[in-house]
Structures are given as structure tokens and as C-alpha cells.
Image: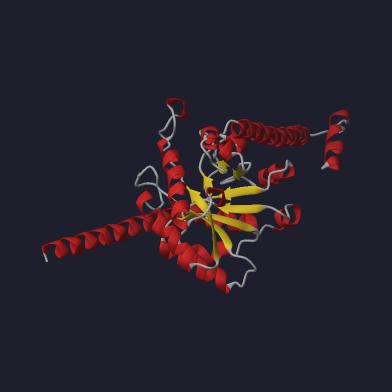
Amino acid sequence: MEELQAKLAGCGNKLIKGKKRIILCVTVTDMLRKMSTEASSIAQKLKTVLDKIQVASDKRPQALQYASPLLVAVSKTKSLDMVIEAYDAGQRHFGENYVQEVEEKGHDIELLDHCEDIKWHFIGRLQRNKVAKLLGVPNLYMIETVDNERLAKAINDTWGRLNKPAPIKCLAQVNTSGEESKSGCTPDSTLELVRYIKDNCPHLDLAGLMTIGSFDHDPKAGINPDFQTLVQLREDVCKALNISTEKLDLSMGMSADYEQAIVMGSTIVRIGSTIFGARNAPQSKATQEEAAEQAKEHEQDKSTQEEAVKSQTSKMKNLSID
């Protein structure tokens, strides 16, 4: 890079015949300048976010001061260069929404060589037929979106067959807002899912709870009820399992509301656009297909759950009649 910059620096001092060559020199110089600006911008934005995380953390009650919040930089649709720039600025935990994308990034030779201790968090809707592919990604650290027993079993069985030295960390995702477009178990079924993972999935390390929450809530309007719900659920789960709340993480808070989430007790925040800028890169065809498959499976799971509820309701009615 330095050699290229040196050559380009002297380009304007030479008599160059041919307009195309002159234009090329100017264009590449501008490109290098832009790359340098973007790099410093990512580092600066990362520092700003970390500073705000610290300020918000200091505002928490003493009972919540036991751990510093973990920043997961959401690199969905972002280039490898941007991931590496953030890594060079000290960031280690990165979040991805699609198996196809994290697989491509995770197996990239340059990234593997340069970012030896990068840690990937999967934060998107996970299809059971893509579990094996996801678990094959190098440096996979955590799956934050386990929202039903069948998915938990699929991850557990696959990880077990890989003979890994330690369980894979996971979070139980809760749909605290009740929106049909969002994944997650219901608040009422959270304890049941947690118990299932604890009792039946020895290859999963249940590290906590996760929620996305409603995008419509304005932090200026007051406390986010979705965050309140997750905080209370952790209390209920820990009481039922007789464990300390410090043993379960809360992954809640994104670019628009992470400061409030931290004050309320979040230990993991997922921030993308504030660090990397708007997600304006087009999705690959494979990623688009994966998104469509995710939506289809979500509808199928929803239908299955509705049928199960109807069946249970019918059984209860029959029992009451008898």
C-alpha cells in the first residue's frame, strides 16, 4: 500500500501523455484517501460507542455493576475490509444475521490470518436445515437466537457430533413485543424452553436471554416495556432454577436504544449502523434466498404452534366436560 501511495504521489509531477492515465492516477488517489477516511471513521465511531457504553454502565444501580456490557458489532452486509478495520481498532465480537454471510466471512483466508481471535455471534433467525453449516464456521462464539425446543435439539445434536471440547454458548430468544414479524418464544414459555435446554442439551451452554423488542418505542418516551419484560423474565428464570442473575446475560439494545438498555441491565448490546453506517450494500442472491426461507419456516413454526395451542385447549375443554 505504501509503495502504491508513493508512486501515486509522484504521478502528478511527471509529464504523462494520455488523458486516461492522468484520470486513473487521480481516481486511485481519491480512492486511497476515501479508504483512509472510512478506516479512521470506523475506529472513531467505535470509540464513541464504547465511551457511551461506559457512561451508561456507570449509571446503573450498584447491583448491576458486576460486569461491563459486551459490544457486538453487527457487520451484516458489511465488507471484510470494514470488519478488519474494526478488529484493528480493538473490536473482537461481531454479529451476523445470515448463515451464508457468516460462513463466507468466517472461512475467508485473509480474515482467518489477520483476525485470529475474532468471535462470531449469530443473531438472525436460524433454520434447522442450516444448523450444520453454521456450526462449521470457524470462531463461532454464540448463537443468540434459540427460540424453540426443536432448534435447540438440532444444535445440541450437531455440536455433539463435532466432538467439540466445550458446549456452544447460546441465548434463548424471547419475543417480548408480541409482533408476528419477530422470532422468539413467548414470555410465558421462556422458562419451559430454558428448562428444556438445561435438562436435555448437554452440548449447549445457556448463557442468557435475548430480545429485539419493538422498533416503534422511542427511548425518550420512557422505559422500554420490552426490556422490562426481559429483565423480569431473567428474575423469574433464575428464581425457578435457583441461580444468581449474574449467571444469565441479557442481550438487548441496538443502535437506537442501547444506552437505555444498559442502564436497565443489558450485558450484551448489538450495534451496527452506528459503527459501520447504513446497511446499503445489496444482499447476495444466496442471502436473499435464505431470508425467504427464514420467513417461510417462521410461518410454518407459527402454524404448528397455533395447532398445538388449539389441541391443548380442546383437551382442556374435554376434561372440564368429563
- Rendered image coloring scheme: secondary structure
Tell me residue 130's x, y (percent).
50, 63
Q: Is residue 7 left or right of residue 86?
A: right
Whether residue 304 is visible, yes or no, is: yes
The answer to whether 38 appears left or right of 3 in the picture is left
Name the residue at the left extreme. Answer: 321
Residue found farthest to the top? 220
Q: Residue at x 61, y 53 (%)?
A: 120
Q: Position of residue 296 (x, y in %)?
A: 37, 56
Residue 236 x, y percent position in the rendering:
43, 49
Is residue 212 at all visible to an observer of this figure?
Answer: no
Q: Quadrant of residue 273?
A: top right
Residue lying at 85% horizontally and 40% vertically, measured from the top left: 2
Question: Does 299 appear above or below 200?
Answer: above
Which image quadrant: the N terminus?
top right
Taking depth in this image into account, of 245 and 187 the one nearest to the observer is 245
Quadrant housing the C terminus: bottom left
Observer-nearest residue: 161 or 14?
161
> Is residue 309 shown left or right of residue 89?
left
- Front position in the image: 137 or 197: 197
Residue at 49% from the left image edge and 50% from the top image edge: 209
Is residue 70 depicted above or below 260 in this figure? below
Q: Count of labels shown?
A: 0
- Rendering coords of residue 182 (x, y %): 40, 47
